[in-house]
Amino acid sequence: MTAAPNPLAPDWLRLPADANALAPGLWPTSASRTSTGALVIGGVNAADLAAEFGTPLYVIDEADARASAADLLAVFQAEFARIGTRAKVYYAGKAFLSTEVVRWMIAAGLNIDVCSGGELAVALAGGADPERLGFHGNNKSLAELDEATRVGVGTIVIDSEVEIGRVAAAAARNNRVQNVRLRVNSGVHAHTHEFLATSHEDQKFGIVLTDAPRLVGLIRAEPALNFVGLHCHIGSQIFGADGFAESAARLLDVHAALLVNGPVPELNLGGGFGIAYTSADEPTPIRELAVALADIVAAECTRLNIPLPVVAFEPGRVIIGRAGVSLYRVGTTKAVDVSGTPRLYVSVDGGMSDNVRPALYGADYAVRLADRASTAAPVLVRIAGKHCESGDIVVDSDYLPGDVTPGDLLAVPATGAYCWALSNNYNYQGRAPVVAVVDGLARVLVRGETIADLLARDTGAQSPTEGES
């Protein structure tokens, strides 16, 4: 008998014809199943990865991440060359950063965007040329600014009026003329397929667009600073180009006014390009975004009769998100009756310590069995974490074969961005390792934390030999 959709499922979730199938667009390009149903990523069997490195485990398809970076750069460069200018692409390190990822991005031709002293240190340890780095943040410390100017970071994004003097002083101490951008709020707020254009801003990042001319005047008055352009970020996980187009038009109006008193060689339109997390998501293809953004910049510069600036972007999620898959081991299952309708809770050995996005943002994910296939009819499941929070949910709703059982290995796709980066030690859970797979080989990018690692930071903990006579 054919299974029927569960009425507890959200409207967007469809009952799958095959609960083993890997939905297109969610998984790394190398993902496949063996004849026995085992998931393979980068030529490596997921069950072998779990056996060697344990679970929870972040798996990154190296070839997928490298190709996504190189392809995105090539598309944006081609489309902006078409209109007669250049495009710069900065990889947004906040999505996921390690020294190896830095090397991948630099090799692909991208610059790197960092927003803390720690991220700066990782980028430098990965061999990045400081000139190819951008430094963000709404509250960069004096020590961070001193280090950034000392090592020669290419561009610092000024986020508030008070930072102008701070960056100038740091640059002067280090005998440097520092390139800076000014982060502004365009009044455009975008998320997924919707955007809202307002004239009011109430957020911690950037300055009101109408204040830009005055602050740029202050920047230009500082001998240790060189103003290169405006910067704006309108949101995250954005589908479509309409929000970017509206924001670009507003920014270019101010950009044109700033040209009256000096050069403005660049315009940074930020990042936020969305990816698919579930089979219901339909992200805008990168080429379509690049074409639309190039066209709107060209049209607005023609309207304003100004030269085309170099246009910069800062994608992160769209490069590394799909390349990542998280592996978990099922611990318990529990059938729950909700007003006569069944839901199966499947608890795993991770949770909000390795993926806090569902708890923070209500983010949706998909899930599949990773070590076998099954002919059992699909049932609605909720993948729960092991932490002491009722909101500790990894996957709110998806269908798995009804015979899912303790000991099964599960895989959650599209976890390359903002999962390890936001990981934590809640309930004294050690952060999971990150493993890269490529050409049938696996290697550790970031080792996992052990209980010994956690206790080593506790000054009251004794080693087994302490206190013995």
Image (spheres, rainbow, N blue to C red):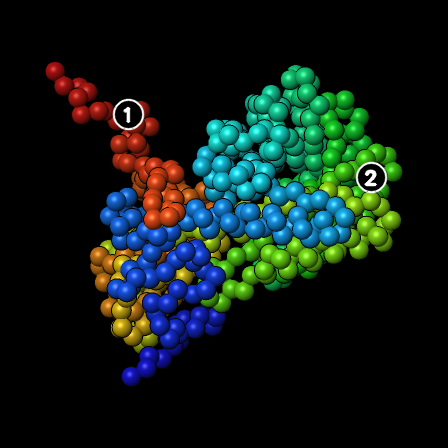
Position in image of residue 445 (x %, y %): 39, 38
Position in image of residue 343 (x %, y %): 32, 69
Position in image of residue 146 (x %, y %): 60, 22
Q: Residue at coordinates 39% horizontally, 73% vertically from top-left?
A: 16
Residue type marked 1: Gly
The residue most toward the front is 439
For the residue pair 169 and 468, the one nearer the viewer reads as 169
Q: Secondary structure at mark 1?
A: loop
- The tag on residue 460 is 1
Q: Relative to residue 323, is residue 136 depicted above or below?
A: above
Residue type marked 2: Leu
- The tag on residue 256 is none
Q: Relative to residue 33, is residue 425 depicted above or below?
A: above
Residue 395 visible within the image: no
Inter-mark Cα distance, 1 to 2:
58 Å
- Location of residue 309 (image quadrant): top right
Specify the quadrant that holds the N terminus: bottom left
Q: Secondary structure at mark 2?
A: helix
Q: Residue at coordinates 51% horizontally, 49% vertically from top-left?
A: 67
Residue highlighted by disc 2: 258
For the residue pair 337 and 312, the one nearer the viewer reads as 312
